[in-house]
Amino acid sequence: MAEQPSSIEENITCCHDILAHHDQDEGDPRFITYKRHFHIDGPNGRHLCLVLPFCGPNLHSLSNYMNSRMKPQFVQALAYQATEILRNLHARGICHGNIRPGNLLLRIRNLDHLGDQGIYRLKILGPEAPRYNVGFLDFMSSGEDNLLNELSLIGFDQAFQISSPKTIEPLTEFLVPEVAVKKPASPASDVWALGVTILNMRSGISLFPWHVDCPEYFITECVKYFGELPTSWEEPFYDEQGRPTSDKTAGRTRDVCDKIHSLKQWIRDIWDEPTQSNENESTPAKPFFVRDEDGSHPRSHDWLSDDISSIINYDPKT
């Protein structure tokens, strides 16, 4: 991690200690803070480095619009797991503060049985010469049965104890209404973020448009879906970057928008599979709209078999 305020390291260390206290034996694999950490001092400052266990892909990479999409039953099972993970974290007195698909990972099986060639098969090489900077392993294209149907949560740099609520800096990846207007974060913030995360897992896209990159635009979009903010919140002014400010002379009020969006319709318009075999390589045809789904759970032993096509629509060429 690049140079960060000392509070970041304090947050991670505190959460690590609390979780370790609850799990004094092997540790709970659902919560990953670090195995160890160290610092590197360089020309750009002091950098905190975290050593994490070897993990599989995050949920953002598994559900990313046309490139890869998780199927409904698999999303349902993972959403249940994510909810249980968050419930358990809150029960331990910790608010995460950065719940998003990129911080939820699938665990992997032990790879100790693989030799060098087996590891190399996990990395899909391009036509260019090998680079020193090694990219992510492509678990989806591997013939190995390495992925588990079990989630882990990472990214505790914004976490804090529920007993000591605080105002956290709004993050582009973690925008919740109260945080966006400089109110203290709380377990309710995590619950909001979990809901948005589940929608992202299910649809492959964000609930909010790509240009929503600051608190002002975010609040505008929230109002379209859910109506005006509570009057007790006393919405702040916003600076030129769209961030909340208490300086009325340097800030401005949010632009009023009369548009209304339907969250129910947004959910109904989620599509699951291309309607044409070559759709990933051409202009998409009219999507398949989801109306009703079978609510049954997939059997635990067949979620992640050698053939992942039953749970993920994936085309490594796109």
Image: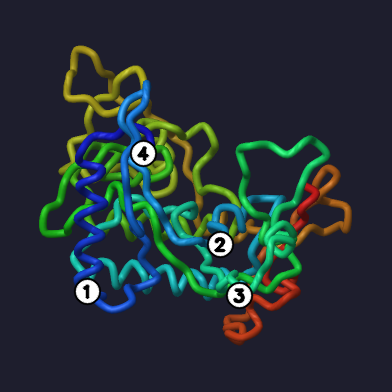
Query: Extreme front residue here?
Result: 115
The structure residue drawn at horizontal position 61% and vertical position 58%, both measured from the top left corner, is: 62
Q: Kindly report the distance in space between the C-alpha atoms of the residues bearing marks 3 and 2.
A: 20 Å
Amino acid under label 3? Gln
| 5 to the left or right of 295 | left
Mark 4 or 3: the one toward you: 4
Tell me the SS state at disc 4: loop
Please state which of residues 189 and 291 is positioned toward the viewer in this rendering.
189
Q: Earlier in the sequence, mark 1 or mark 4?
A: 1
Q: Which mark is residue 171?
A: 4
Q: Nearer the viewer, mark 3 or mark 2?
A: 2
The residue closer to the viewer here, 194 or 12, is 12
- Percent coordinates x, y for residue 51 in the rendering: 40, 53
Residue 241, percent across and down?
Answer: 36, 21
Residue type at mark 2: give it: Gly
Residue type at mark 4 is Leu
Q: Nearer the viewer, mark 1 or mark 4?
A: 1
Q: Residues within 10 Å of mark 2 (few under 14, many from 20)?
A: many
Report which residue position mark 2 lands on. 56
| Circles 1 and 4: CB atoms closer than 8 Å | no
The residue at 53%/47% (across/down) is 206
Residue 215: x percent and y percent?
Answer: 35, 34
Residue at mark 3 = 73
Name the element at disc 1. helix
Tell me the SS state at disc 3: helix
Which secondary structure, mark 2?
Answer: loop
